[in-house]
Every structure is written in C-alpha cells, then in structure tokens.
C-alpha cells in the first residue's frame, strides 16, 4: 500500500484564498483553526486584522496587527497594515495578506 503523500492545505493559506474571494466568514473559520493548532501565528492575526478592517472595525484590526507584531516583531505585513491604516491610506492601498 502506498503512503498518502497529499499535503493538507494550511488553514492560513486557505484563509488567504477565501479573503481574496471575499468569503470572510470562511476565512475566519480557517484562521480560528490555525490558531487552535498553533496560537502564536503572526500571519493568522494579520489576516484577522485584514478581515476586521474590510468590515469596518478598525479598532479590532489594529489590535490583531499589534498581536501579530508582539508574536513576531519582524513580521512586515502586520507592520505595513498597521502603518497604512494609522496614516489613513486604507482606501488607497490594498492590505498586505503576507
């Protein structure tokens, strides 16, 4: 019998795909799955911030981006998103999905 070599897609990767399709609830579900598996994933918090920003909840978006930066101070997408939103460039530039 041959071993199953199919790679299970990472929940964060699936969330990115759902965000691009504007399926935000599905994306959030994938991110919750990712965080239940490993609660210290900066990229998951960054994407939660993107979802919050798109839905008009800037305060929650900022919180998620700050958590991402606490977990990984060098995680550039969260820094870019936080800086962009604080400067009011949110509507001129697309958020970074990492």
Image (spheres, rainbow, N blue to C red):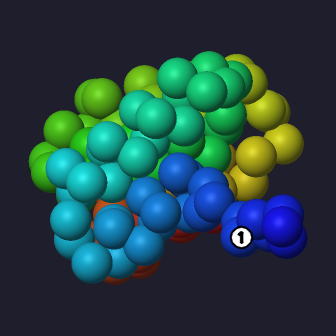
Q: Residue at x 53, y 51 (%)?
A: 11
Compared with 97, 67 (above or below) is: above
- Answer whether residue 89 is visible to the viewer in this image: no
Q: How many marks?
A: 1
* SS category of the residue bearing label 1: loop
Q: Residue at x 84, y 67 (%)?
A: 1
Q: Which residue is mark 1?
A: 6
Q: Position of residue 29 (x, y in %)?
A: 31, 42
Query: Residue at the location (33% across, 68% down)?
Result: 18
- Count residues near mark 1 (Cα–Cα under 10 Å), then give few for <14, some for 14-19, many for 20+: few
Left or right? Give the position of 65 relative to 89: right
Q: Position of residue 87 (x, y in %)?
A: 43, 53
91 horizontally vs 44: left or right: left
Name the residue: 19% across, 38% down: 57
Is 88 displayed left or right of 43 in the figure?
A: left
- The extreme front residue here reads 1
Q: Position of residue 55 (x, y in %)?
A: 15, 51
Is 27 rendered above or below residue 63? Answer: below
**Residue 31's image quarter?**
top left
Rendered-image quadrant of the C terminus: bottom right
Picture quadrant where residue 17 is located: bottom left
Residue 32 in sight:
yes
Up-down: is 44 above or below 47? above
- Residue lying at the far left of the rendered structure: 56
Q: Between residues 4 and 30, which one lies in front from this camera angle? A: 4
Q: Position of residue 53 (x, y in %)?
A: 27, 50
**For this view, does 83 lie left or right of residue 7?**
left
């Amino acid at each position: 019998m041959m071993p199953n070599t199919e790679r299970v897609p990472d929940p964060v990767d699936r969330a990115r795909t759902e965000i691009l399709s504007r399926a935000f609830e599905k994306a959030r579900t994938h991110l919750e799955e990712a965080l239940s598996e490993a609660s210290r994933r900066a990229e998951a918090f960054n994407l939660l911030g993107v979802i919050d920003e798109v839905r008009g909840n800037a305060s929650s978006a900022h919180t998620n981006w700050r958590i991402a930066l606490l977990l990984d101070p060098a995680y550039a997408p969260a820094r870019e998103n936080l800086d962009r939103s604080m400067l009011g460039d949110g509507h001129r530039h697309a958020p970074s999905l990492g």
